[in-house]
Amino acid sequence: MRRVVILMLVLLVSFNICGQEPMKKIALQEGIHNIEYDHLNLTALLQVYNEESATHLIGDLFLSLEHDGEEVASFYVEIDTSAKEYLTKIYKNYLLTFMIENSNRYLIIEKADFGKKFALSSNRSATIGNPHHAIELAITDYIYESGYDGPPEDENRNYFTDVHYTLKVKVKDVVKNFSFYSSEIKGDFIIELQDYEIQILSDLYKNSYCLIEMVVHRKEDK
């Protein structure tokens, strides 16, 4: 009897693990959507700027995602494709992707795992991986700097702007802080850890927040 009970428990646990959705893709129409995934309950608001909007806004899209009344991510897609917008953002240990395919709009939700590109906001921290292999990330500081690279008497001096970032990384009980400048990010800027590496791809600075796009790799997987 005991063997039967243990076998049933193993089967139930296996079923629950297999039954978890690895990814959820939701078709979005203009308006409000209530979305559930894992332990995440989201309210999504998609706004499409039509002919009744200001001329420079027509065709643009805005998607806001809230959890328990708090905005956890937002996306603004302009017709002018030169404007930078990251379409995969991270909230806690979830990746949220706003996708447009053949004029159809989708929200893709999945667990944050290694090897996937995402943008980390200075407004919140995030976790990559699972309880056995996890790395926590947070932008703890960002400072906009501007000025000249030489004294006033230097006729060849140049005006510069830059952003100084501090990224906090926690693996188990070990916490480290890494500082770098926006000007150092060239797509191959890598922060090396014992078991992981963080590839910094790009950044976006705003007055009230910043975003850093990155990929986290487990060295064991490479």
Image: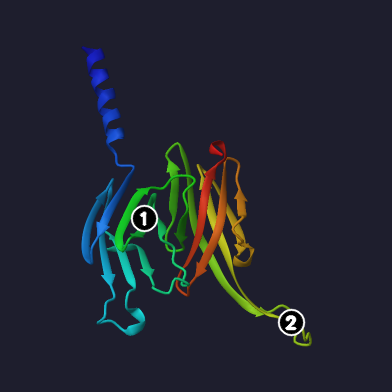
Label 1 sits on a secondary structure element that is strand
Gap in Å between the C-alphas at discs 1 and 2? 43 Å
Q: Amino acid at mark 1?
A: Leu
Q: Nearer the viewer, residue 169 or 28?
A: 28
Q: Amino acid at mark 2?
A: Arg
Label 2 sits on a secondary structure element that is loop
Snapshot colouring: rainbow
- Give me the residue at 42% from left, 63% from top: 123
- Give me the residue at 51% from left, 43% from top: 173
- Give me the residue at 28% from left, 72% from top: 48
Q: Give above or below for 48 relative to 172.
A: below
Residue 122 position, x and y percent, is 46, 63
Q: How many numbered tags mark residues here?
A: 2
- Give me the residue at 75% from left, 80% from top: 150
Residue 1 position, x and y percent, is 20, 12
Residues packed near mark 1 inside 10 Å, few (<14), some (14 to 19) or many (20 plus): many
Residues packed near mark 2 inside 10 Å, few (<14), some (14 to 19) or many (20 plus): few
Task: Say the numbered circle drawn on residue 108.
Answer: none
Q: Give above or below for 9 relative to 60.
A: above
Q: Earlier in the sequence, mark 1 or mark 2?
A: 1
Task: Say the numbered circle drawn on residue 96.
Answer: 1
Q: Nearer the viewer, residue 25 or 174?
A: 25
Q: Nearer the viewer, residue 204 or 105?
A: 105
* Residue at which label 2 appears: 157
Residue 42 appears anywhere in the view: no
Q: Hey, which quadrant is residue 79 in on the image? A: bottom left
